[in-house]
Image (cartoon, rainbow, N blue to C red):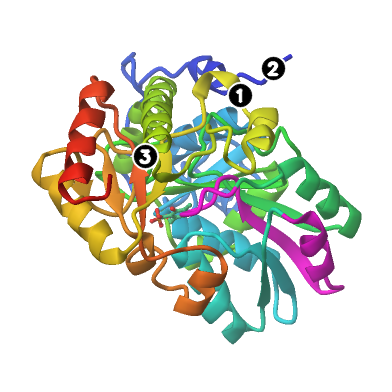
Amino acid sequence: MAFKPANNIQDLQYFGEFGGVNPSISDSSTYTFLSAKTMFDTFEGNAEGCYLYSRHSSPSNLYLGEALAAMEGTETATVTASGMGAITAVLLQLCSAGEHVVSSRTIYGGTYAFLKNFTPRLGINTTFVDITQLDVVEAAITPKTKVLYCESVSNPLLEVADIKGLTELAKKYDLKLVVDNTFSPLSISPIILGADVVIHSLTKFINGSSDTVGGVVCGTNEFINDLRNVNNGAAMLLGSTMDSLRSASVLKNLRTLHIRMMQHSYNATYLAEKFENDGLKTVYPGLASHPSHELFKSMMNDKYGFGGMLTIDVGSLDKANALMELMQEDNLGYLAVSLGFYKTLFSAPGSSTSSEIPEDEQKSMGLSDGLIRFSIGLDADIERTYMMMKACMKKLNIL
Ligand code: PLP
């Protein structure tokens, strides 16, 4: 039977403390115990249903984690203060000094910087590869490798990872396959395809209102307990804990994710097809011209489409900047990083979200100066948006 991630969210039932239709928010950093013995047991992780201290867990964070685990089909999940809080904790939990990561070279700039510049200080080294070439990925694996790391749809180039193929490699070499699914929530379910751990930056589509940063790690009970372990858990000890007020607000937004993703995907498909017909170099996984279009189709939960992210290449950074400024002036969206907002957001990744990646490496991975990354919004009238965008492009001789 097909996996139905949004049904799994809907099927959860929460009652608030006073019968409210939303769970009550746990507005406490610490919790009392009637007996000292229960406090000790809770500290050791043996007292079900008891809370100790909110960096470890809180009722509000557990509710949100439960809903995200249901969405991804994992046993459980832990929420973090940001996507990077989730990524760094997972990688440091899975790798020790002397060990090795094989990572996609086209990943979010912050993750790239962490693996390229920061973890080598701790003796953890990374080989960056073209994740779409399974033979290249396999050749990079060494006896020290512990983790295969990728984004299901990569930021910013929108390369698509073959999660089933990568799962086979992970099994063959006893590695953990960690997938950042931030660009394709609901559309792709990496765990169902065989991944071990799924991460999201909740900052993006899942929260959807660009009012907070947040993250989540979805995985087995064993792994999430390891992350939260008071003695050696990276999530617990590095301390990137989400605040309960925030997790309650993200949970409320999560409930409309399925509707938003359908509209993001509908609008992005409309624009991608038009832009491509107009002769613009357009990358969108929903276009037949995308090298991994068929692969995406073979992995996707149909209903939610190919996502809200697309790129066009307008030839130069100057042109890209002029177009983005003009589109903002015409209220077609914001010149801003991040994604998953109700308004369209656009930025030139080479000089912003991927600027951590050195210029020569940007070139070798195909990240050109004139690339504009769009997070297409929830526009009610995408035809009008297209006509107005086209007028901007004509004005600047891009079309
Ligand atoms: N993963 C991806 C794919 C991202 O695009 C981002 C941020 O842009 C992150 C992770 C980091 O998330 P956060 O900014 O919430 O720390």
Residues in magenta?
133-159
Specify the quadrant of the image occupied by residue 381: top left
Q: In this view, does 110 lie above or below 342?
A: below
Disc 2 target residue: 2
The answer to whether residue 31 is seen in the rendering is: no
- Ligand 1 within 8 angstroms of badge 2 C-beta: no
As drawn, the label of residue 301 is: 1
CB contact under 8 Å: marks 2 and 1: yes
Q: Distance between the residues labelled 2 and 1?
A: 8 Å
- Mark 3 and mark 1 lie on one chain; the one further toward the N terminus is 3
- Front label number (3 vs 1): 1
- Ligand 1 within 8 angstroms of badge 3 C-beta: no
Q: In which quarter of the image is ligand 1?
A: bottom left
Task: Please name the amino acid that badge 1 sits on.
Answer: Asn
Asked if the magenta segment contains residue 276, the reply would be no
Nearer to the camera, 28 or 92: 92
Q: In this view, does 326 lie above or below 262?
A: below
What is the secondary structure assignment of the residue under circle 2? loop
- For the N terminus, give its image quadrant: top right
Disc 3 target residue: 247
Task: Please name the amino acid that badge 3 sits on.
Answer: Ser
The answer to whether residue 315 is seen in the rendering is: yes
Q: In this view, does 223 lie above or below 209?
A: below
- Front label number (3 vs 2): 2
